[in-house]
Image (tube, rainbow, N blue to C red):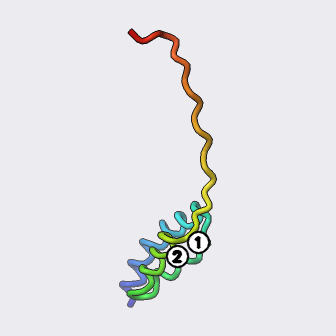
């Protein structure tokens, strides 16, 4: 049990940041602590959840100063 909790912290910290960046509640990462079903629940939330990411603006087209040969 202690080993499972120790290994879970290695996954919870990065997943917490991922959930926060994609606009989901970071508390969902605590499901990872549940043996067997926890990781499956977290991955299902990431796979099928609605990501609220604001798209970055498209880069402006660069103007070529020299003509192509």
SS category of the residue bearing label 2: helix
Which residue lies most toward the front here? 69
Which residue lies most toward the left here? 3
Answer above or below: position of 41 versus 58.
Answer: below
On the picture, is 39 further left or further right than 29? left
User: Mark number for residue 43?
Assistant: none
Q: Quadrant of the C terminus?
A: top left
Answer above or below: position of 69 versus 3.
Answer: above
Count of labels in the image: 2
What percent of the width, then of the height, locates residue 28? 56, 77
User: Mark number for residue 26?
Assistant: 1
Residue in the image at 54% along x and 64% along y: 17
Residue at numbered disc 2 = 29
- Nearest the camera: 43 or 35? 43
Which residue lies most toward the bottom here? 1
What percent of the width, then of the height, locates residue 24? 60, 69
Residue in the image at 42% along x and 72% along y: 10
SS category of the residue bearing label 1: helix
């Amino acid at each position: 049990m202690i080993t499972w909790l120790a290994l879970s912290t290695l996954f919870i910290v990065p997943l917490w940041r991922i959930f926060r960046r994609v606009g989901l509640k970071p508390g969902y990462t605590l499901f990872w602590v549940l043996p067997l079903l926890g990781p499956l629940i977290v991955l299902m939330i990431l796979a099928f959840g609605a990501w609220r990411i604001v798209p970055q603006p498209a880069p402006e087209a660069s103007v070529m100063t020299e003509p192509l040969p």
